[in-house]
Image (tube, rainbow, N blue to C red):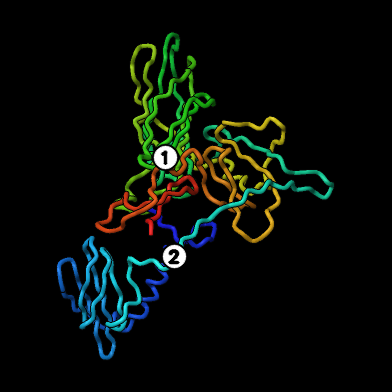
Amino acid sequence: MKNVLLPDAGIIRQPKWGHLKDLHKAIKLCEEALIATDPTISSPGPNLETSVYKTGSACVAFLANTGTNDATVTFNGNSYHLPGWSVSILPDCKSVVLNTAKINSASTISSFATESVKEEVDSLGSSSSGWSWISEPVGISKDDAFTKSGLLEQINTTADRSDYLWYSLSIDVEDTAGAQPVLHIESLGHALHAFINGKLAGSGVGNSGNAKVKVDIPITLVSGKNKIDLLSLTVGLQNYGAFYDLVGAGITGPVTLKGLRNGNTVDLSSQQWTYQIGLQGEDLGLSSGSVGQWNSQSNLPTNQPLTWYKTNFIAPSGSNPVAIDFTGLGKGEAWVNGQSIGRYWPTYVAPTSGCTDSCNYRGSYSSSKCLMYFWHNDTYYYKIRN
């Protein structure tokens, strides 16, 4: 779970930011007693608990209601109202400076105003807006490729050098007459493209609930040598939860070829695969936009994987955060002036029916409780409602 208080745009996410700021301020008032002694804990009633830290002249109390109904507790001769599932903080064992169920910060809703892109004009008066592109080569294109038996797990293989890992294999087919071969691929995630003899044959993607990919792609083979190139893509790695580091990614198989002319199924998983970490364009530094032979013809390629795109624009005036709308693109990563601004994948958007207008925070926590979804850089984020 990503519980974002200060997102990339730099806009404070209220009311959670303010509520936690108030909580930290209240805890700071209790510092002297908290670090000097252990608490004395008692239970003045069902689902009620008091924790008292006392040393010298300092006295701090935490009054907790672990039930789901409101309650009243008497402490040191005074009566205190405790909303269900809340804690009141008393830095002097008398006055409540904060109750965790009461929000004092106002909610804020951010909005963006759409502004048309302004053309950039060079010293000769020519416009340089418009898009140009470079096609990434399919398959092995770098000198640091290596060969291993079997299918390798992606995260350990790439070691954070790239989101991309190529799996390449050459096979010989004696006779393809009458055959209807199907390439079966299983991956731990998060997406893949399959190319046969340099041409895209099919793709597969996981989702936010299940990153694994399993596809059956009808393919066309030729008699003799055929080249299978599989590109595995990760779209951000899990960084929380039990054993998250053991989840893995990439095409770990099985990879099989079904429906050959003799009806046999060939398991390709244990073959000698050639691997390439990353894309050629990454090594060339195409993300800077200042290197490479960019094509600027009017027939801009669309719906074509492995394409680098570039354009120029004038930044909007003012100092407010700027957002770029990627809904006309597929999955990829974006750079502005050579600086990565993150991955994008507008195919998956936050659900319109996934949230309710109200939330009862009381009771035990569950991962589906009081959620508010939003979308950023090809990942579902959600925060606990306040």
> At 34% across and 13% down in the image, what residue appears?
263
Along the line of sight, which residue is nearer the eye, 224 or 318? 318
Q: Could one spot residue 252 in this view of the protein?
A: yes
Q: Residues within 10 Å of mark 2 (few under 14, many from 20)?
A: some
**Mark toward the start of the polypeptide (2 vs 1):** 2
Which of the 4 image quarters holds residue 43? Answer: bottom left
Above-or-below relation of 82 to 34: above
Q: Nearer the viewer, mark 2 or mark 1?
A: 2
> At 44% across and 11% down in the image, what residue appears?
175
- Point out residue 161 in the picture as x, y percentages from the top left corner: 49, 49
Which of the 4 image quarters holds residue 60? Answer: bottom left
> At 37% across and 16% down in the image, what residue appears?
259
Q: Where residue 17 is drawn, which disc sits there?
A: 2
| Element at label 2 | helix
Instruction: State how far apart marks 2 and 1 are (Cα).
Output: 32 Å
209 relative to 75 in the view: left or right:
right
Q: Residues within 10 Å of mark 1 (few under 14, many from 20)?
A: many
- Point out residue 122 in the picture as x, y percentages from the top left corner: 79, 48
Inspect the image, locate mark 1, and give the three-letter code of the amino acid beneath it.
His
Q: Are marks 2 and 1 in contact (CB under 8 Å)?
A: no
Q: Which residue is mark 1?
A: 190
- Point out residue 174 in the picture as x, y percentages from the top left corner: 43, 13
Inspect the image, locate mark 2, and give the three-letter code of the amino acid beneath it.
Trp
| Element at label 1 | loop
Tell me how many marks there are: 2
